[in-house]
Image: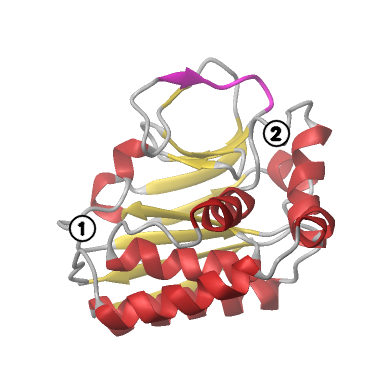
Amino acid sequence: MKLSYVMSPYFKSLGITSTVVAEIYGINIERENPEVEMIKNQAAKEVMKMSDEFISDNTILQSYRDLLKSIGRSPKKFPPSAESLIQSVKHFQRFPQINVAVDSYNVIASRNFLALGVHDLDKLGSKITFRLSDGEEPFTAVGSQKVKYTQPGDFVYADERQILAWLDSKDSELVKLSLDTKNIVIIIQGTHQTTQEYNLAALENACKLITRFCGGTFEIQAVE
């Protein structure tokens, strides 16, 4: 792997028990693909069948909410990323159209209820650290221009320069994928409700779907 990954002991103590990462190299991202649109449409039908009660009671989504509550954060303000995606699909009755790589991993996130962070590898430093924030660290979420600041004890992961993902809820605008992206990092942070095998299978499915339509090769590993 091109990057190194460091896990803070305090990070695991919160209940983020299994973190797995993948690096994908040499991809070519297109705006859209007819076959991906068909896959998205099928996934949207699956999401539309999810009742509000099912989403509310889903054990994986609830474990992310409980994680937020354990550090005094609101799941309403920082909903699990998969839950935000599912609610968006239910509202608009379709998946968003971003690009082939993003659209591919969104399908996986909706089916596995996991927090997937996806970043342009070439915009990162050499090391990603999973840690608790000291507070007052700037962060701009994907799709936003507003800078917000972390609170002490927020769980994040960051490279040497910046936070890449905040509270398993938001990814950074500064390192998001674009049509120019050639190499990417995918990070899944599981909870006590997900096994490492479950997380690795979801990660492999995301990598296979992306490389199926964008080309490239991938490596996967668990972060201990």
The local crowd at label 2, few if under 14, some if 14 to 19, many if 20 or more residues have their Cα within 10 Å, is few
Image quarter of residue 61: bottom right
Give the left or right position of residue 150, taking residue 209 as reference. right
Picture coordinates of residue 75, whole percent (x, y): 72, 36
- Who is closer to the viewer here, 194 or 153? 194
Q: Nearer the viewer, residue 218 or 104?
A: 104
| Amino acid type, mark 1 | Thr
SS state under label 1: loop
Q: Is most of the magenta stretch helix, strand or loop?
A: loop
- The residue type indicated by label 2 comes to Lys
Q: Position of residue 132 (x, y in %)?
A: 64, 32
Whether residue 187 is visible? yes
- Please give the range of residues in magenta: 147-153
Q: Is residue 148 magenta?
A: yes
User: Mark 2 against mark 1, which lies toward the viewer?
Assistant: 2
What is the quadrant of residue 79 in the picture? top right
Give the vertical position of 66 relative to 24 (above or below). above
Task: Please rate how many residues cluster around mark 1, counting C-alpha atoms within 10 Å: few if below 14, some from 14 to 19, many from 20.
Answer: many
Q: Residue at x 21, y 67 (%)?
A: 29
Displayed quadrant of residue 124: top left
Residue placed most toward the observer, 148 or 55: 55
Q: Position of residue 71 (x, y in %)?
A: 78, 30
The residue that mark 1 highlights is 181
151 is within the stretch colored magenta: yes
Q: Mark 2 or 1 closer to N-term?
A: 2
The residue drawn where x is 39% and y is 57% is 96
Kindly state the secondary structure of the residue where label 2 is placed. loop
Q: Which mark is residue 76?
A: 2
Q: Is residue 108 above or below residue 121?
A: below
Between 68 and 26, the one nearer to me in the picture: 68
Tell me the residue at 79%/49% (across/down).
15
Q: How far from the left and from the top, in percent, is residue 73? A: 73, 28
